[in-house]
């Protein structure tokens, strides 16, 4: 499934992952105060504070530090997401929020769930974007993307010689898993990816159940 290729020579752009991180911070600011642990500004501030040295470490070629900081950022936003989902579940029977506000908050947390786990898959697959670039391998080590299932002699015809996943590919995987509650076009290979996927599906399912129950209560 993986083979060296000399056709992959451009570093993977990281602005998409950075945009996803900023989106997580922005969505967090839009959540009601009752669904946030600590000050509203805390998570966005932590994201900005940690992203800055992460970018600097990447620019200076300190890839181990960059990877470690990326793991820390992902861990922080994951903990914030879990806390907000728990507060969302608690808010339904307590009726602390108006129905429309609660439904909007659930949708925001669902989208955050997609972005958070897309960042995890992008950060961990094959050791991260830097190692994926250095190895110059075809495809993925943890997911079986559709491109990897095409015969080698046919890859040129589809223009996927030397293909490897980018952030958008991991975003699509996270989106479909949150939508269908299971892997779709990219079966899982790595044990770590299976564990993260179970966590993502559990949170997505929890949010959807809360939204449905609240919608039924409104009706």
Image (cartoon, rainbow, N blue to C red):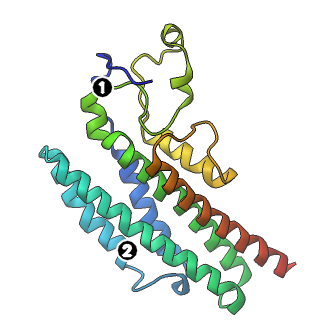
Mark 1 and mark 2: Cα distance apart in space: 35 Å
Label 1, residues with CA under 10 Å away: few <14, some 14-19, many ≥20: many
Instruction: Please say if 117 is above or below 172.
Output: below
Residue 51, horizontal then vertical, whole percent: 27, 60
Instruction: Please say if 167 is above or below 159.
Output: below
**Point 30% across, 63% down: residue:** 72
Q: Secondary structure at mark 2?
A: helix
Label 1: which residue?
136
Residue 14 seen in the figure? yes
Residue 61, horizontal then vertical, whole percent: 13, 43
Earlier sequence position, callout 1 versus callout 2: 2
48 lies left or right of 195: left
Q: Quadrant of the C terminus?
A: bottom right
142 or 13: nearer the viewer: 142
Residue 43, disc:
2
**Point 57% across, 75% down: residue:** 85
Residue 211, horizontal then vertical, whole percent: 72, 72
Q: Quadrant of the N terminus?
A: top left
Residue 216, disc:
none
């Amino acid at each position: 499934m993986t083979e060296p290729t000399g056709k992959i020579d451009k570093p993977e752009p990281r602005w998409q992952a950075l945009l996803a991180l900023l989106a997580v911070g922005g969505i967090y600011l839009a959540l009601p105060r009752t669904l946030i642990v600590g000050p509203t500004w805390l998570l966005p501030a932590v994201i900005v504070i940690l992203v800055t040295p992460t970018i600097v470490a990447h620019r200076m070629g300190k890839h181990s530090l960059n990877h470690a900081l990326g793991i820390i950022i992902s861990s922080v936003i994951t903990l914030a997401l879990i806390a907000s989902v728990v507060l969302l579940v608690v808010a339904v029977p307590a009726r602390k929020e108006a129905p429309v506000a609660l439904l909007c908050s659930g949708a925001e947390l669902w989208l955050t769930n997609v972005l958070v786990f897309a960042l995890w898959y992008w950060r961990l697959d094959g050791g991260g974007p830097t190692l994926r670039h250095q190895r110059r391998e075809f495809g993925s080590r943890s997911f079986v993307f559709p491109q990897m299932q095409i015969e080698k002699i046919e890859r040129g015809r589809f223009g996927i010689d030397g293909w490897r996943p980018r952030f958008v590919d991991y975003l699509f995987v996270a989106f479909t898993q949150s939508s269908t509650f299971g892997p779709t076009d990219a079966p899982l290979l790595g044990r770590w990816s299976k564990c993260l996927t179970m966590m993502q599906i559990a949170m997505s399912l929890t949010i959807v159940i809360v939204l449905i129950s609240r919608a039924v209560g409104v009706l």
